[in-house]
Structures are given as C-alpha cells and as structure tokens.
Image (cartoon, rainbow, N blue to C red):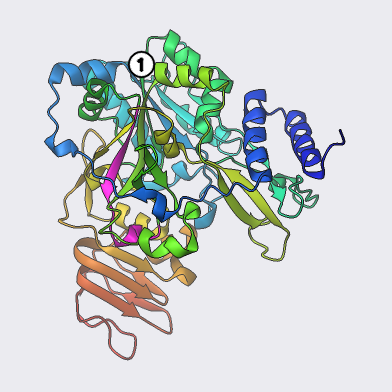
Amino acid sequence: MAMTVRSKGLEAARAKMRAAGVDEVAIETFAHYYRLLEHGETGMIAESSIEPLDMESLADVEVSEEDAFAAVRATAVIKLNGGLGTSMGMDRAKSLLCVRRGLSFLDIIVRQVLQLREAYDAPLPLIFMNSFRTSQDTLDALARYTDLAVEGLPLEFLQNKEPKLLVDGLTPVAWPTAPELEWCPPGHGDIYTALQGSGLLGQLIDAGYRYVFVSNSDNLGAVPDARVAGWFATSGAPFAIEAVRRTASDRKGGHFARRKSDGRIVLRESAQTLEADKEALADLGRHRFTSTNNLWFDLHAMRDTLVQRSGILGLPLIRNVKTVDPSDPSSPEVVQIETAMGAAIEVFEGATTIEVGRDRFVPVKTTNDLLVLRSDIYDLGKDFVLDQVAETIPFVDLDGDYYKLVGEFDKRFPEGAPSLREATSVRIEGDWTFGRGVRLTGEVALEATSAQRVPAGEVLGEAGTDGDGGADV
C-alpha cells in the first residue's frame, strides 16, 4: 500500500526528531498527536458538551498536623522553567529576572524550599523542568546553593522539542536562516512524557516519594504548602489542581468544567473554545474557576496509567497555528502541536480540584504583573513566602509602547515601583518615569503625548490627569 503524503510528513518528522536526539517516548507521543491532527482533530470543547463546576474550598478543609507533615515529607517539587520571557524582551531563563530585594524568581523559589525543609524536617527535592535554552543559565545560577541537591536525584530534566509543521501538508518546516525556529516545545503537557523518558518518574518512586507538586517558576505564590499536601494525600485522589475564582483579567483564559458525557472534570483553554462559545468562556458567573497551574499527582497512579496507555497519557490536543518566525507575520504558517499539563485531570478517575486563595496564584506573564509583584502589594517574609498585605490587587494596564519590554520598563521605574496598596486600577498611556516613593491611590489614569516625570513622593489619586498631560493630584 502506497504511503500517503501526510504519513510521509510523519515519517519526515520522526526522522528529524531522531536526528536531533529526541527521546523515543517523546517521538511516539508526537506521532500520536500527529495522527489526530491528520484526521482533523481540533481539540475543541463545545459549550454544549460541558456544564459549570463547583468545588470545595481549602478554607473549609481540616488537615491534621501529622497528616500535613507526613505528606510534605513524601513530596517532590517540580518547577516548569523552560520559558525565556521573550514576550518581555528577555533572551535567557525568565526565572532569572530580579523581582524583589535583589532576588530573582529562582532565588526566592530555592529559599522557600530550603526554609520548608527545615520547618518540616523533609527532604523536599526541588527539580526544574528546563528547556535546552534555559538549562545552562539555570544550573549556573543554582550553583551557589550547594545544599540544594538531594542525593540520588538531579536538579533538572529537559522538556522535549518537536518540529513545527507547515499548515499546508503537515510536513516539518525548513527555515535555513534560523534553524532553531524549526522547533517548538510541545506545551507543558510534555512534563509527563519527559518524566517518563528521562527515567525521573522511576527514580522518584524508587527513592520513596509518593507525591509531586508542580507549578510554574514565575508564580511565587506556588509554595509546596504542607496543608495543601496533607489535603491531597488524605483525599486519596490520583491527581488534583488548585483553582481560583476568575476575575476580569481571566475572561479570556481557560476554566474548569464538567463533561456531560461522563462527569469528568475538564480544563478548557481559550484555544479549545469555538468562536461561537467565546461569550460563554468570558462569563464569570457561569464558569467561575480558573487553573493556577499548581497541580499535585500521585507518582504510583501516574506510573500505572502510563503503563496502561503504552507511555502516552492521551491529553487533549491543542492545535496552535502561528508563523514559523513569530516576529515575521509574512513567514509561512505552521501548526504547533501542544498539550496542557492541567488537562490530565480528565485522564484520571477520581481526579479533583480545590479552590485556593489568590495568594497561591501570582503569575508574572507581563510587565503589568511585574509592577504588582515589585510593589508593596506583597511583603516577602523571612520564610520567603509572599504575604499579600493590600486588600485587593489593582488592575494594571501599562502602555505597551513604553513598558512591554523589561529593559524599557526598568528605565521608567529607576527608583523602584510606586506604592500600589491603596490603588484599585492603574492605567498609564504615554511615556512616564516615576521618582522614588510615589504613591498611587484609588483609580489612577495617566495620559501624556510627550515624556513626563512623576516627582519623588508624589501622591496620585482618582483625579487622573489634566489636559496638558500633567498629573492631577
């Protein structure tokens, strides 16, 4: 039987991955999703197929100190650390960005874990899932923490990579001027494939660990808290995700729901939402909970499920269409096959969710988020855990022409972030530079058509700005 054009595309992709040294488990996982793509699978989740999800709150959960301590001693921590922060103008591991008191995300994460080890007399291994582009930078930065590594376990394992596929024909794209652009990560759902292919899944089980806590390295609220560990361990669930109430800033993001056909919890991302269902996606009253990407799983359950499924967990496909060169919209359109790690919740019978406070979800995806994190909204305690001291988190919208890139952002806050404790919203249009000790209160809206400076010690409030672009106090 003659090989079809598209199966030739799969064979070409397989050959390309093998030549690049990609793990065989990852190659076969890619092949699984390629076949789905080839047969027209889009990964879309129709609104008519789901219903809203209710969940219990951690605030109402009682966990004994004994259970909490036992659980955290059987837990390993994995941080997703493959991102370069390119959308913020960075070209190295995003976790190396300085965020508080001269410390980077990485510094604070490590110190959080070291403090918890001491508090709970627990080994609490900390392991980073790096990409080939963040690995060396990360390991160099970790070298100063000589007591971080746990004997017999690595400090990192690498996420896989896969070829971008031309939309027309699903063949691997060739881009000789920048060959690195021919590749993409498979999304953070690759963590399960990488854990298995690297052998780390077995290593952790052999070393006596039962649970894993996974979160993003740019979320300093994601501390491996013993109370949450105790809740997960005593729940008996094989898999769980921490959820928070959606706010206006989450309208376009993913949410949890329950699938009508089998009652399983699903995580629907915006890329899996039909255009006709976008209004329902944005309905905060209907779909009330979003994922923190803080998740817990039982290592034995993960191992057994992967064995049953021949190494392929079978997460829902996300078909992501981009251009081969993200900075050049005229470059050829490509498909990136992706999966979300939180989508594994629908794979496991008995998987669950729990509502946590917003203090466990402090992601930094833009410089808007960075301004909040660097401000006095949070205190950084002796245990290096963030403590939200402001009553609410203000909405922040900075002019992308001047603040989107970290280098330009830093130039405009040379003396540090202004006080935001009393602010409810901050909208800045135009080129504003802030002096030391500026305080923003209530609703603040600044507009300028030329470069402006907010003097040191200034207090800006709801009056906004005058017609000349100067701040009204």
The answer to which of 173 and 147 lies nearer the viewer is 173
Hey, which quadrant is residue 5 in on the image? top right
x, y (%) of residue 164? 69, 46
Hey, which quadrant is residue 221 in on the image? top left
Q: Is residue 240 magenta?
A: yes
* Residue type at the position of mark 1: Arg
Residue 213, placed above or below residue 366 = above
**204 relative to 63 in the view: left or right:** right
Residue 45, placed above or below residue 309 = below
Q: Is residue 130 magenta?
A: no
Q: Residue at x 42, y 75 (%)?
A: 431
The answer to which of 277 and 166 lies nearer the viewer is 277
Q: Residue at x 30, y 62 (%)?
A: 248
- Disc 1 designates what residue? 210
Q: Residue at x 36, y 67 (%)?
A: 397
- The residues colored magenta run 239-252
Residue 433, placed above or below residue 251 = below
The answer to which of 161 and 123 lies nearer the viewer is 161
**164 relative to 364 in the view: left or right:** right
**76 relative to 158 in the view: left or right:** left
Q: Quadrant of the C terminus?
A: bottom left
User: Label 1: how many residues lie within 10 Å, few (<14), some (14-19) or many (20+)?
Assistant: many
